[in-house]
Image (spheres, rainbow, N blue to C red):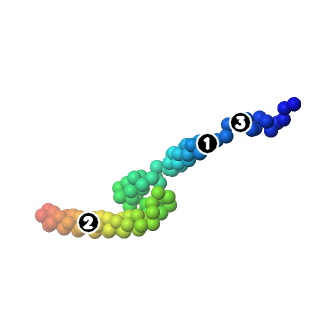
């Protein structure tokens, strides 16, 4: 007579190696699930070339950055944005002066 439990004892038991492969697959799936805009290179590109300080919430939501790197990037974005604002103001002043000079020449 055969019992149901006999089949269970004959089945292959998982080895520790099987679990390590599962962990590797799980990490791979987590990387694949991470949106491109949460990956470090995506966040940095968006911060410096597209969004500026408006991308800081994206930086703070990203699980790939540590606390120190978030603070450093925040300070870098503030300095970078300040430089761009002051450079834009200086360019605007120079253009205004040039337009005034041109208007005086045309009179």
Mark 2 or mark 3: which comes first in sequence? Answer: 3
Q: Which mark is residue 15?
A: 1
The reply to whether residue 57 is visible in this rendering is: no
Name which residue lies at 39% across and 56% down: 44
- 42 sits to left or right of 23: left
Instruction: Residue 84 in the image: state x and y as whole percent.
Output: 30, 64
- In the rendered image of this protein, does residue 99 appear above or below residue 19? below
Q: What element carries label 3?
A: loop
Quarter of the image for the C terminus: give it.
Answer: bottom left
Which of the two discs, 2 and 1, labels the residue nearer the N terminus?
1
Left or right side of 8 for 71: left
Give percent across and percent down for residue 58: 47, 59
Front-lying residue, 51 or 32:
32
Q: Residue 87 carries which label?
A: 2
Name the residue beneath numbered marker 3: 11
Name the residue located 26 percent from the left edge and 66 percent from the top edge: 87
Tell us which disc is closer to us: 2 or 3. 3
Q: Is residue 66 above or below residue 12?
A: below
Classify mark 2: helix, strand or loop: helix
Q: How far apart are marks 2 and 3 (CA)?
A: 72 Å
Q: Quadrant of the N terminus?
A: top right
16 displayed left or right of 70 = right
């Amino acid at each position: 007579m055969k019992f149901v439990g006999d089949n269970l004892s004959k089945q292959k038991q998982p080895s520790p190696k099987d679990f390590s492969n599962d962990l590797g697959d799980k990490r791979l799936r987590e990387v694949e699930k991470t949106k491109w805009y949460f990956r470090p290179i995506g966040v940095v590109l968006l911060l410096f070339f597209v969004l500026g300080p408006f991308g800081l919430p994206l930086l703070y939501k990203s699980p790939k950055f540590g606390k120190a790197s978030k603070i450093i990037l925040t300070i870098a974005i503030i300095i970078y944005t300040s430089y761009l604002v002051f450079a834009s103001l200086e360019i605007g002043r120079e253009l205004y002066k040039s337009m005034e000079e041109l208007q005086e020449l045309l009179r």
